[in-house]
Amino acid sequence: MLIILQMLQISTENLGWHWCNPLAIDNEGIITRTIETPENRATLVIRVKQISNCQKQVQYYTNDEEILKKYNRINICFRNLVLIILIC
């Protein structure tokens, strides 16, 4: 059996471009991830919504007040990964 998962990672400039753990975006729903650095920790709430057969909408939010106060905007980077699992 072959399983293919579409994965996504999020990083923010404000946290030194540290990446959160990968998250699967194959299914709609809400996922939380944490980005940690030696100085800061931010929790991201990510919402995945299917728009069409080939498009997904990924929205992210953070309620980390320290980061929101310190920065007027949060620059982010998405890294798209594909995880292929072969089960014998």
Image (spheres, rainbow, N blue to C red):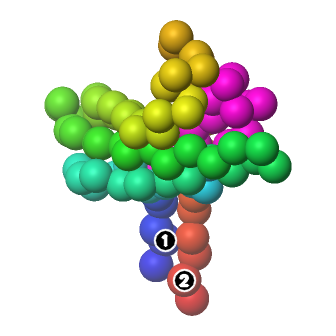
Neighbour tally class for label 1: few under 14, some 14-19, many 20 plus, Cα within 10 Å: few
Residues in magenta, as a range? 6-19
Total labels drawn: 2
Horizontal arrangement in the rendering, residue 70 relative to residue 52 (left or right):
right
Q: Residue 81 appears in which quarter of the rendering?
A: top right
The x, y position of residue 6, in whole percent, is 47, 49
Q: Is residue 82 visible?
A: no
Residue 56 sits above or below residue 27 on the image: above
Q: Secondary structure at mark 1?
A: strand
Residue 43 sits above or below residue 61 on the image: below
Neighbour tally class for label 2: few under 14, some 14-19, many 20 plus, Cα within 10 Å: few
- Residue at 77 percent across and 30 percent down: it is 16
Residue at the right extreme of this rendering: 38
The amino acid marked with disc number 1 is Leu
The x, y position of residue 30, in whole percent, is 28, 52
Q: Quadrant of the C terminus?
A: bottom right
The residue identified by callout 2 is: 87
Q: Is residue 69 visible?
A: yes
The reply to whether callout 2 and callout 1 are in contact (CB within 8 Å) is yes
Report the Cα–Cα distance between label 2 and label 1. Answer: 6 Å
Horizontal arrangement in the rendering, residue 26 relative to residue 24 (left or right):
left
Residue at the top extreme of this rendering: 72
The residue identified by callout 1 is: 2
